[in-house]
């Protein structure tokens, strides 16, 4: 009788192990699965179309979920995902969740560019009189700063008329005003809804297009007259892989996942994918692919 009971207990335990960690649920598969949440373009595309195959060569399974950017940090912090890919370091530094996240690497930068509109290709941007820019505050500030960096307008000359406040984060224009004019009246900059920027190109000498706008509008980088290219700015705001810091430092299995993902993101294959897929609109090279571990 004792032998029978022992046999039954052994069988039950064996079945329990089989169910929880065997064929039915694939415990080994879970251990080799990296779960990443990301924004759609280019983040999820890069992960699914390039990085997934790179990781598979070393036996890793990459699962990618597209999530709204506003919940991605919380989703990683809670353990629902191993890492995310959507933000830059300055944004990550604003995260106030109880679980600390860190950037394992920087990957790519999405620059704002000045594209030819009515102006003939080859015309210097300093010869432009009319410019269209995106009407959301963040991109509008970037556009004005880019125009200043390329010599179209001057902070010194404009003085209080310069549309970006000293804090660099506030647009000094009324909510109803859609056009800014330089003090000498020679340059006008009009705020245009993002979804109308590409179709409005022919109405302005030049237009400042966020790279995703240029890409989805099929505007090749050969039509770009200038671009954000300050090395410090590019490296500082390159998009990153973010993961849980404490788990990375204390959990060998989790660290192995993040290290594998990070190495793949820093590969030449990823840089080549960006160059070919996004028509040169995005920057992914030695200036942006930076190991932060």
Image (cartoon, grey):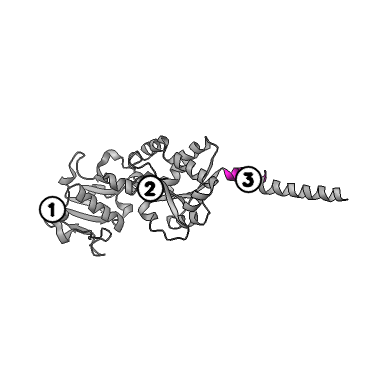
**Distance of mark 2 from mark 3, alpha carbons?**
32 Å
Instruction: Tell me: residue 65, above or below residue 71.
Output: above
Q: Residue 78 location in percent, x, y?
A: 51, 57
Q: Which comes before the other along the chain, label 2 or label 3? A: 3
Q: Secondary structure at mark 3?
A: helix
Q: Magenta stretch: residue 27 in it?
A: yes
Q: Residue furthest right?
A: 1
Q: Magenta residues?
A: 22-31
Q: Which mark is residue 186?
A: 1
Q: Residue 290 location in percent, x, y?
A: 37, 42
Q: Secondary structure at mark 1?
A: loop
Q: Which mark is residue 27?
A: 3
Q: Does the CB distance between marks 1 and 2 fall below 8 Å?
A: no
Q: Secondary structure at mark 2?
A: strand
Instruction: Tell me: residue 163, above or below residue 220.
Output: below
Answer with left or right where residue 60 lies relative to residue 131. Answer: right
Q: Residue at x 56, y 42 (%)?
A: 32
Residue 92 vs residue 67, the one in the foreground: 92
Q: Is residue 70 visible?
A: yes
Q: Is residue 82 visible?
A: no
Q: Residues within 10 Å of mark 2 (few under 14, many from 20)?
A: many
Q: Which mark is residue 239?
A: 2
Question: Nearer the observer, disc 1 or disc 3?
Answer: 3
Residue 192 vs residue 36, the one in the foreground: 36
């Amino acid at each position: 009788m004792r032998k029978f009971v022992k046999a039954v207990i052994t069988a039950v335990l064996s079945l329990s192990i089989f169910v929880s960690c065997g064929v039915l649920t694939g415990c080994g598969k879970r251990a080799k699965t990296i779960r990443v949440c990301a924004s759609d373009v280019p983040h999820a595309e890069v992960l699914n179309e390039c990085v997934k195959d790179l990781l598979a060569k070393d036996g890793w399974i990459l699962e990618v979920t597209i999530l709204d950017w506003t919940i991605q940090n919380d989703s990683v912090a809670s353990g629902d995902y191993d890492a995310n890919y959507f933000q830059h370091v300055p944004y990550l530094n604003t995260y106030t969740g109880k679980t600390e996240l860190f950037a394992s690497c920087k990957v790519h930068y999405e620059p704002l560019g000045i594209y030819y509109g009515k102006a003939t290709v080859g015309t210097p941007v300093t010869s432009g009189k009319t410019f269209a820019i995106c009407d959301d505050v963040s991109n509008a500030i970037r556009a004005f700063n880019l125009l200043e960096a390329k010599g179209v307008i001057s902070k010194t000359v404009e003085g209080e008329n310069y549309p970006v406040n000293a804090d660099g984060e506030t647009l000094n224009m009324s909510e109803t005003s859609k056009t800014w004019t330089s003090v000498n009246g020679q340059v006008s900059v009009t705020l245009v809804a993002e979804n109308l920027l590409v179709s409005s190109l022919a109405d302005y000498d030049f237009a400042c297009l966020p790279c995703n706008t240029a890409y989805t509008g099929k505007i090749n980088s050969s039509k770009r007259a200038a671009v954000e290219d300050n090395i410090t700015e590019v490296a500082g705001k390159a998009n990153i892989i973010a993961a849980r810091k404490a788990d990375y430092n204390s959990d060998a299995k989790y660290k192995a996942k993040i290290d594998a993902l990070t190495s793949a993101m820093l590969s030449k294959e990823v840089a080549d994918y960006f160059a070919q897929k996004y028509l040169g609109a995005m920057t992914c090279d030695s200036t942006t692919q930076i190991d932060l571990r």
